[in-house]
Image: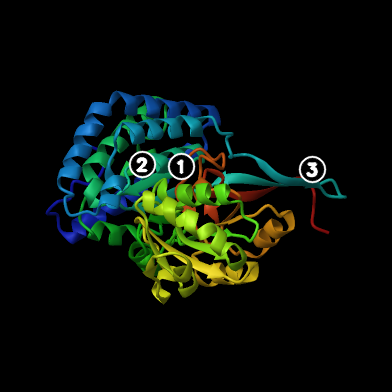
Amino acid sequence: MNGIEGAGASQTALYQEVEACARDVSAAGRKLAALPGEQRSAALNAMADELAAARTEVAAANAADLAEAGSLSPPLRQRLQVDDKVFSYILRRLRAVAQLPDPLGEVIEGTTRPNGLEVRRVRVSLGAIGIIYESRPNVTTDAAAVCVRSGNAVLLRGGSEALRTNLVLAEAMRRGATRCGLPEAAIRILGSADREAVHALLRQDRYLDVLIPRGGRSLVETVSRESRIPVIKHYDGVCHLYLAADAPEATAVALTINSKCQRVEVCNALETLLVDEAAASRLLPALATALAAAGVTLRGCPRTRQIIACETADETDWAAEYLAPMLAVRVVPGIDAAIEHINTCGSGHTDAIVTQNLERSRYFCRLVDSASVLVNASTRLSGGGDYGLGAVLGISTDKLHARGPVGPRELTSYKWIAIGQGHLRE
């Protein structure tokens, strides 16, 4: 099995093994970036084929992980489970990424200077990527897919609660990748449940170019604070939907229900509903009925509670990422108040407006400071597949180096290439 077997090993030995893995991944990244895009596409399809053939093994490993996860909350158990629907989704994402254009070698811009010097800015891979994540086994496959497509080798460290599932997924993908000539260490997973493996990983700045943490705020903050490696952060998804004064009732209800209820445990699920004062009496009763039918508990501001029966919201609710069937509801006096609330209480992840007014929608999009801003669309659409990126490594709430869905192009950098004919500096 590819990875670290380090149960019971000394901390020194564990550190040495993590370092050896990082060194191998770094070397693999240089080789992977030199391979043709067609070869990496073939590898992605072969990875999907190997996963499909390993379905029974994946199911057994996932059942064992779930059996030991009895204390997890229902939303977290759902994240961990790889049922037929999730497994089909995994295979589709791999094949979708295989069909994406190869980002490497793309000329981002190019000019010919008056003296005849040709100057180009060309897209290149980052090199070696470390991914630290919790619970969701599909991150294992998404991460491998995005990294292979962008010519980056990847070192994976999933949560201990999904260790068996992740090891089986990674091994199947490794078989498919190497069958198509990719380096053995292009996809590597740490097989140790020891938390010290994470601390060792954070110190591999000699070999890893970027770290991406996927998980709760405490994980992201720990990695950001302790890492010696640049970090692309994926913070909370405190997502908002603002129902403007002219929001149609049917659209408002449908988008609220889909944004909140389609998957309550994910980062682009709706957490706070903002309703314009001019539409509150018209919209809130229908919304309350639909949300109650979906099993969602509401916590409202004083004005909301004058219109519908619900629990009382306090100040902590406005910045809460529930990841559960709970929704904060606030009546606001207008669009400027909605924007102020979002920019103050939100996490810069995904926010949306429902309106029939073009100028109002443009105003909202211009002033809301978030990675994704949607108009008359569910917050659940912010991501890789619906944005045409295939798979993504997460939703970055940073502004540097990547913002929003982190797909293959977001895992590239660039180099300058100048072509002359004996040109000299005058």
Callout 3: SS: loop
Residue 216 visible in image: yes
Residue that badge 1 annotates: 147
Q: Quadrant for the N terminus, please.
A: top left
The residue under label 3 is 421
Q: CA–CA distance between discs 1 and 3?
A: 36 Å
Q: Percent from the top left, x then y, of residue 396?
A: 49, 56
State whether residue 2 is above or below residue 39: below
Q: What residue lies at 51% left-to-right and 41% top-to-bottom?
A: 150
Tell which circle, 1 or 3, labels the residue nearer the N-terminal end: 1
Callout 2 amino acid: Asn
Q: What's under tag 3, amino acid-wise?
A: Gln
CB of mark 2 within 8 Å of CB of mark 1?
Answer: no
Considering the numbered disc 2 on the image, is that residue within a helix, a strand or a loop? helix
253 vs 128, nearest the viewer: 253
**Which quarter of the figure has residue 278?**
bottom right
The percent position of residue 370, horizontal first and vertical second, equals 57, 61
Residue 92 vertical placement versus 204 (above, below): above
Disc sitting over residue 353 in the figure: none
Question: Is 78 situated left or right of 341 in this image?
Answer: left
104 relative to 228, above or below: above
| Image mark for residue 138 | 2
Tell which circle, 2 or 1, labels the residue nearer the N-terminal end.
Answer: 2
Q: Residue at x 70, y 57 (%)?
A: 362
Query: What residue occupies the far right of the structure in this picture?
Result: 114
Local packing at callout 1 (Cα closer than 10 Å; few below 14, some 14-19, many 20+) is many
